[in-house]
Amino acid sequence: MKWLRISSALTGIAACSLVLAQVAPHAREAGAILAAQDNPAALSELKLDAALAHNDRLVQDNIEAALSAGDADLAESFVTLARDRNIALPDDLLSRVGDAVKTENSTSHFARRFATGLVTGNADDVASLSGTVAGDLFVIGDIRDVVRESKHLAIGEDTDRLVLGLATAGLAVTAVTYVSAGGAAPVRAGLTLVKDARKVGRLGEGLAAWAGRSAREMVDTPMLQNAVASGSVLRPGETISAIKAAFRVEKAGALVRLGKDVTRVAEKTGTRGAMDTLRIAEGPKDVARAARLAEAQGGKTRAIMKLLGRGALLLVGGAFDLTLWLLGAALTLFGLLSSIKATTERLTQSWCDRRRARRLRRAQAAADAALANTAVTA
């Protein structure tokens, strides 16, 4: 029975050690991810390790896909990621990416996209954004959007209140930009990007809902309708003054912060990187996280967000599973330590029992010898 108890304890040690060896790597990874959940740069690195470990052609395949889609900027972002990760790429692929980037950055292409952004107010790259921002800074774009959406509102048609609010906020910020000699220009560019993302359907549903609520709070609708009714693109000064009166500046703080964060992303990743962020963001906190990620990862950011999606910014589900890995490792470790403790106690008890039995045998032998000597003497 004694050896059976020792054997069961030793079996427990072996079983727990085997399970712990299997669980420990997952628990270590889970612990690292949970510890990095508030640090987008560290979190994305950990998730990239896992993604790239399962597919050694992941970067190359995404470069091919980006080139096929005509997105040279994304292809270049993946090349930057490959260099950072020491991933070898074929020379002909690198040459194709270089040619595509050169074409995209050519003077003729830039001029064409600038004109498109200036006229249409839609942006999907640096050139078209420059045109869009130029139009908004000259108030043409924002007045156009405010007048259009306000007329829809006045006659009961479907109104994009988010575009209306962003354009109204943009006019107020533009006035500040002129007064401050460009000091508010980054906010202006960020708000323009959000507005453009909304127009082309690249604004995430969660972020759009949040921004829509913020926009409604900023605009005094009846006053704005009166301003539009009496305003004109041909009299921009009067129109801006009337629109500004309908704009509640004290309610614009959240959208201004959003504009700043979007600009921080665009400065590091380009316009398309900012658009990618707005598409996957579910709220302003996601955009702020993306800004921190972009500042840490630079040109790799678009590739990272393409591979990981919103998971590059925060834990998207899986937190419960990660916690289970840690709990499983903790329970297995507890079982191992308990088995070691039981084995040590039983081996010690066995050793003590043997010594006690040995002493008893020696005492019994001494007593028997003394009794024999007494009998002989008698």
Image (spheres, grey):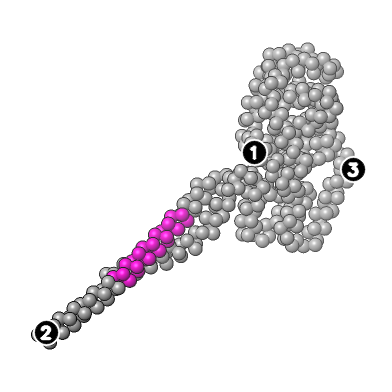
Residue tagged by mark 3? 108
Q: Which residue is at the far left?
A: 378
Residue 37 placement (x, y as % from top left) = 59, 45
Magenta stretch: helix, strand or loop mostly: helix
Q: What is the quadrant of the C terminus in the image?
A: bottom left
User: Residue 360 magenta-drawn?
Assistant: no
SS at circle 3 = helix
Residue in the picture at 61% in, 56% down? 50
* Residue 375 numbered mark, or none: 2
Vertical comparison of 13 with 129: above or below: below
Residue 350 sits in which quadrant? bottom left
Q: What is the three-letter code of the residue carrying label 2?
A: Ala
Amino acid beneath label 3: Ser
As drawn, 370 above or below 143? below
Would you name the residue on which mark 1 appears? 286
Q: Height in image: 174 above or below 339?
A: above
Alpha carbon distance from label 2 to label 1: 99 Å
Instruction: Name which of mark 2 and mark 3 comes first in the sequence.
Output: 3
Left or right: 358, with 172 as reference point: left
Comes first in the chain, label 2 or label 1 = 1
Split into 4 quadrants, where in the image is the N terminus? bottom left
Q: How far is disc 2 from disc 3 in space, using C-alphas?
A: 126 Å
Relative side of 262 to 33, left or right: right
Q: Is residue 342 magenta?
A: yes
Residue sitting at 42 percent across and 57 percent down?
334
Horizontal and vertical percent for residue 10? Answer: 38, 68
Which segment is the magenta one? 329-353
Q: Say which of marks 2 and 3 sits in front.
A: 2
Location of residue 155 by image quarter? top right
Q: Nearer the viewer, mark 2 or mark 1?
A: 2
Q: Label 1, secondary structure: give it.
A: helix
Q: Nearer the viewer, residue 281 or 160?
A: 281
